[in-house]
Image: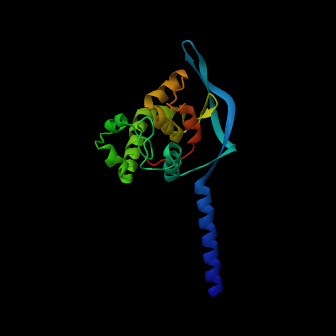
């Protein structure tokens, strides 16, 4: 009886481990066949290719991993930092973005509240997703001008340059960059493939 119970426990443990592995790993293949070209006046058409299963592996990463990764890129995950342009905290928020999110607080209060900064980031992701939903729905999982487009990549790019700059990239191919010369397409690539819960 004891041996049978041990065998059952071992089997259930193995099954749980296998399920966890399947839940956190996803495999894709990048197709090189163009499926559409967007005609744009005065600009070369944007080439879009499809994504099918296998070949290039992308780890499915969690919402928490996304916040940790983007916070590290922005500030090495430091809540109390202000850069030379006046952007504040872990996610380097500007005053105008905080006003847009209806967060009215002093610089000191913002820098001293990790909870408020995490709340601001969540609200910013929700705000940007609403403005970019049709682009997410249309292009998620496709290759545009050599870049794999994903929801998390789009929202990371919007965090860097604003949702308007992301829309402009989809419409015209124009790439915005911040004061440090970081391009929104770099964020789109670096932060692709995360599962966001918004």
Can residue 66 be seen here? The reply is: yes
User: Which quadrant holds residue 88?
Assistant: top left
In front: 157, or 72? Answer: 72
The colouring scheme, among rainbow, by chain, secondary structure or one colour, is rainbow
Lateral position of residue 23 relative to residue 80, left or right? right
Residue at x 59%, y 55% (from the top left corner): 24
Judged from this view, the residue extending furthest toward the right is 55
Residue at x 33%, y 47% (from the top left corner): 108
Q: In which quarter of the image is the N terminus?
A: bottom right
In front: 115, or 111? Answer: 111
Number of numbered callouts drawn: 0
Q: Position of residue 117 (x, y in %)?
A: 38, 48
Judged from this view, the residue extending furthest toward the top is 42
User: Which quadrant holds residue 183?
Assistant: top right
Q: Where is residue 22 in the image (x, y as percent from the top left)?
A: 61, 56
Can residue 149 be seen here? The reply is: no
Q: Where is residue 34 in the image (x, y as percent from the top left)?
A: 65, 27
Lateral position of residue 178 relative to residue 44, left or right? left
Residue at x 42%, y 45% (from the top left corner): 89
Lateral position of residue 172 relative to residue 128, left or right? right
Q: In this view, does 128 lie above or below 195?
A: above
Judged from this view, the residue extending furthest toward the bottom is 1
Q: Is residue 41 above or below residue 104?
A: above
Q: Position of residue 42 (x, y in %)?
A: 56, 12
């Amino acid at each position: 009886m004891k041996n049978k119970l041990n065998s059952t426990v071992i089997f259930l443990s193995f099954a749980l481990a296998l399920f966890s592995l399947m839940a956190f790993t996803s495999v894709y293949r990048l197709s090189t066949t163009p499926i559409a070209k967007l005609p744009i006046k005065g600009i070369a058409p944007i080439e879009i290719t499809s994504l099918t299963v296998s070949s290039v592996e992308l780890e499915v990463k969690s919402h928490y991993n996304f916040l940790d990764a983007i916070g590290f890129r922005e500030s090495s995950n430091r809540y109390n930092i202000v850069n030379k342009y006046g952007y504040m905290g872990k996610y380097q928020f500007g005053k105008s973005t905080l006003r847009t999110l209806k967060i009215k607080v002093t610089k000191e209060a913002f820098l001293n509240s990790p909870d408020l900064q995490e709340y601001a980031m969540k609200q910013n992701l929700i705000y940007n997703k609403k403005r970019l939903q049709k682009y997410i729905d249309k292009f998620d999982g496709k290759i545009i001008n050599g870049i794999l487009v994903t929801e998390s990549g789009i929202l990371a790019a919007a965090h860097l340059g604003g949702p308007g700059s992301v829309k402009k990239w989809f419409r015209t191919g124009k790439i915005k960059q911040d004061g440090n010369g970081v391009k929104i397409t770099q964020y789109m690539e670096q932060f692709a493939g995360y599962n966001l819960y918004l």
